[in-house]
Image: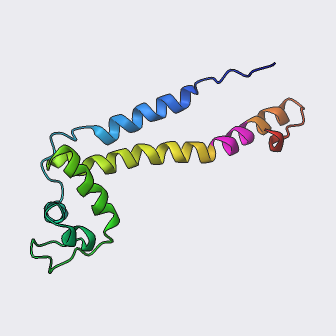
Amino acid sequence: MNRKKKKIDKWLVWILTLAVALNFTNIWEDEYVNQYYTSAVKSMMQNLHNFFFASFDPAGFVTVDKPPVAFWIQTISAKIFGFHGWSVILPQALAGVGSVILLYVMIKKSIWCSCGANSCANHGYNANCSSR
């Protein structure tokens, strides 16, 4: 059997290293980036009513002006790691790194084909990107 070895893509490693460095720089030194939304996360940690309706105040009367899904993820992170500034920011930092991976996977084939097609056209070869 002819098995292809999977090579580690050096560009992906470099880009991910840069993304991690930029997303996680000083994450532990930030106290509370946005006081309004951080207090909403703290309120959402108190009971399920506040959690599901993204309530800003502990009584559950005032809601936050954004959809609650992002705050649910922040609240779960704060429940797991404790209520700190970095535990509220951590989901956004991980989402930033994940979006870099997703973008790289989405455009890798098209960029490779365009670069490969240009270099093959310059050398007189017929590049067929659809077969890759």
Q: 123 or 57, which lies in front?
A: 57
Residue at horizontal 20 percent and vertical 51 percent from the top: 79
Q: What secondary structure do most residues of the magenta stretch adopt?
A: helix
Viewer-closest of 76 and 104: 76
Say which quarter of the image contains residue 10.
top right
The N terminus sits in image quarter = top right
In the picture, measured across the screen, residue 99 lies left or right of residue 128, that is: left
- Residue found 22% across the figure and 46% down from its top: 80
Of residues 121 and 70, the one drawn nearer to the viewer in this rendering = 70
Q: In this view, does 8 lie above or below 112?
A: above
Q: Quadrant of the C terminus?
A: top right
Judged from this view, the residue extending furthest toward the front is 48
Vertical side of 69 occupied by 60: above or below: below
Asked if the stretch drawn in magenta spans residue 109, the answer is yes
Specify the segment rendered in magenta: 108-115
- Relative to 15, is 65 on the left or the right? left
Residue 43 % position (x, y): 14, 65
Q: Position of residue 45 (x, y in %)?
A: 17, 60
**Residue at point 32%, 61% (across, down):** 70
* Residue under the point 14% across and 53% down: 32
Question: On the picture, is 76 further left or further right than 36?
Answer: right
Q: In this view, does 132 lie above or below 91?
A: above
Whether the magenta-drawn stretch holds residue 58 is answered as no
Please identify the quarter of the rendering in which residue 59 is found: bottom left
